[in-house]
Structures are given as C-alpha cells and as structure tokens.
Image: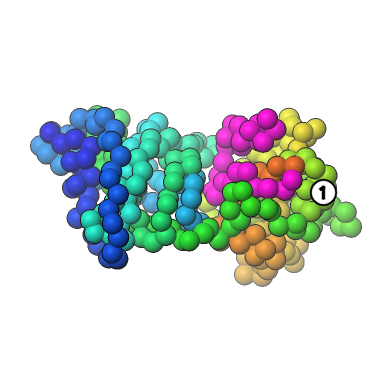
Amino acid sequence: MLGWLGNIALALAGLAALACSSASAPTPAPAPMPAPTPAAGGAPPEVRLGLATVDLGVGPNRFAFGIIGPDSRPIRVPTARATFMYIDSTPYQVRAQAEASFVTWPAGRAGVYVVNDVELDKAGRWGLVVEVETEDGLTRIGQLGFDVGVASSSPAIGSLAPRSLNKTANGVDDLGEISTSPEPDPDLYRVTIAEAIAAGAPTVVTFATPAFCRTSTCGPQVEVVSALEDKRSDEASFIHVEVYDNPLEMGGDLSKGRISPILEEWGLISEPYTFILDGEGVIRSKFEGFVTERELEAALEEVLG
C-alpha cells in the first residue's frame, strides 16, 4: 500500500520530462501529510491537471488548477492534496504541501482547486503533484510542470498600485462605450483608480470583459463585484475596468478589439483579475481568475480591519 510520499515518488518520473536541470543545494522536505488509502493493486490511477493561474512569481501566490478524470470529466470533490516541488535542481526539492479546496465557478458548471498563499520561493521550473480521493473511493494522482518568474507580471502584493486613469461614466453617453457588460452597473464606473486611491478608502478593482471572456467567468466576476458594492459601498470604492478599449466599435467582433492600455499599465496577462487596495493604494490581495464573493469580502474585511 502506497503512502503520500510513495505516490510522490511515482510521479517523479513524469516530472522528469518537465524539468530543466540546474545545480542547487536540496532543502529538507516538510513532514508529509497523512495519506489516504490508494486503490488496491499498487499505483493509484492517474488524472490530468490543468493550470488555471499563469502569472506566478517568487513569493506567496494564489494557485489554482483543475483536475480531469480518466473519463475526461472534471473531478469536483471538496479537497485535494497538493505538493509543490522545485525541479530546476537534482534531486527535486519538495518546497510546500497544502490542501487545495474546490471553488465552484458561476452556475455550478465548473470550478477549480485553489491553494491560497502558497510560497513559491525560487524562480524557475516547478512541478505540482496532486492526490485526490474521488467519489468512487479511489485515490488518483496527477502531475504538471509550471514556471515561476522572479516576479509576477502584475503588481506584487505589498506594492503601490498604478494610479490609472481608467474610463468612467463621466463624459460618455452610453456605458456601452466603456463596458461589454450586458447591463453595466453605473456604480462601477464612477471614479478612476487614481481618484479612488486619492479618496483614502480601500478599493476593489476588477479587470474583465464580460462579452468576450474565454472562461465565461468575466461577466459573473463583474456581477460579484457589483453585489459586494451594494453591501459595502460606504466602506470602499468598487471599479470595473473593461479589457477592450472600444466596445461599441467592436460590435461583437473580437477581431476589431483594442486592448485597454490600462491592462498593460498593470502588467496583466490573463483575465479576469481582481485586486484589493488599502487606503494608501497598496495592493493587499490579488486574484487571478474567478474569485467568489465570499473570498473577496473576506479579503476586503482584512483591509478594513
């Protein structure tokens, strides 16, 4: 019967194909978590993993991934075990272990497993090994490789947010000029990011394109921010920045779209992306991909104290 570290050992052969070797002194592995019981007959059956966060840099990261079973259907159990290995060295170094929680995307159609604040402490090539006990009672294992940069492309937690002059409702006849939301919430287009920071209260800003999102989560993400604004508008500013600079000109044709220069200013390489700033304009939390209202409100409450 294999234990957790035994399952990791089985995955190393797969990770070897994902690694680039570099000399580095190994770091002792953390104590293993208790292991569930694998399927009878030795090695657990494999699953496929899909990376849901790509803007990864040295330091704490919100890491998200999907799990696809042997039947090509998503696995949606409440938790999975995640081990993060630095594989730009020989031997590989186990750097962190955590329990990943399943977060359902809008309308319950899909979701991802999320590990909050996992410390990825070196730039280079990493490997993820996941062990999940599925509803049929079997323990399954999967692995993938990913890259960690010296810094994330987007502003780091603890850094000052750009004082951006995003488009607002002031000076436009139709909110469709600045948003692809089917029913834009005027409250999300009242102020620029620069004005919100100058006001001295926390700010929640989300970058998304509801009409053209690749994962169908952008519209719901803006709705989440709008719902939170309804509850906490007296405590923080809430802003939606449309990914495309010319929604009306596009007329539904993505090929005519021009990316907003605000996204380049923030270094965004994916969307939706949501940030929480404190009253000084310092980034206190950031969420690549869809974030639930519960997660977002909890992070905002930390800033509000």
- The structure residue drawn at horizontal position 57% and vertical position 35%, both measured from the top left corner, is 295
x then y, percent, for residue 121: 42, 52
| Quadrant containing the C terminus in the rendered view | top right
- Above or below, 6 relative to 162: above
73 left or right, relative to 264:
left
x then y, percent, for residue 124: 39, 61
- The structure residue drawn at horizontal position 76% and vertical position 52%, both measured from the top left corner, is 193
Q: Is residue 288 magenta?
A: yes
113 left or right, relative to 285:
left
Q: Is residue 13 magenta?
A: no
x then y, percent, for residue 34: 26, 30
Q: Which residues are magenta?
A: 280-305
Mark 1, residue position: 198
In what element is the residue under mark 1? helix
- The structure residue drawn at horizontal position 33% and vertical position 54%, both measured from the top left corner, is 86
Q: Nearer the viewer, residue 79 or 147?
A: 147
